[in-house]
Amino acid sequence: QAQLVESGGGLVQPGGSLKLSCAGSGFTFDYAAIGWFRQAPGKEREGVACINSADAAHILIDSLKGRFTISRDNAKNTVYLQMNSLKPEDTAVYYCRATVPITPSSATQYMYWGQGTQVTVSS
């Protein structure tokens, strides 16, 4: 059974930092592209960052560049989202998603979501 579990969320003051983890199991983690998404109350879910199986990493929102970093540790089947200089507008539920091809060259992919972790930035 494929599974993604996020952790590391919590309450932090503006200007603080958090490091989110996304741990995968039940699929070949090395093959997976992993994305972080977030959804604030009353807003649509948006893509935050992604990293592919070749370790190519991208921050998808301009206002997050220089503050957020995505990385992966395949030995631990985990992708991280380091969030620095947090702002109240970063408050959201953060989700990770794995896109996994059946084989590295296959066009057939499976997609899995985690349950989300709450990040609240407030004084």
Image (cartoon, rainbow, N blue to C red):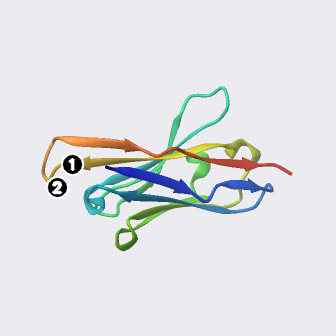
Residue at the farthest front position: 1
Residue at the farthest bottom position: 75
x, y percentage for residue 83? 62, 59
Q: Which mark is residue 6?
A: none
Q: Is disc 2 surrounded by few (<14), some (14 to 19) or many (20+) residues within 10 Å? A: some
Q: Is disc 1 surrounded by few (<14), some (14 to 19) or many (20+) residues within 10 Å? A: some
Query: How far apart are the two marked residues, 2 and 1, measured between alpha carbons?
Result: 6 Å
Amino acid type indicated by mark 1: Pro
Amino acid type indicated by mark 2: Pro
Picture layout, residue 24 above or below residue 118: below
Mark 1 sits on what residue?
Answer: 101
x, y percentage for residue 87? 74, 50
Question: Front-most of 82 and 8?
Answer: 8
Give yes or no for contact between labels 2 and 1 (Cβ–Cβ under 8 Å).
yes
Picture layout, residue 100 above or below residue 74: above
Task: Give the structural element (helix, strand or loop) at label 1.
Answer: strand
Residue at horizontal 52%, vertical 54%?
A: 6
> Left or right of 97: which side holds 84?
right
x, y percentage for residue 23? 44, 60
Mark 2 sits on what residue?
Answer: 104
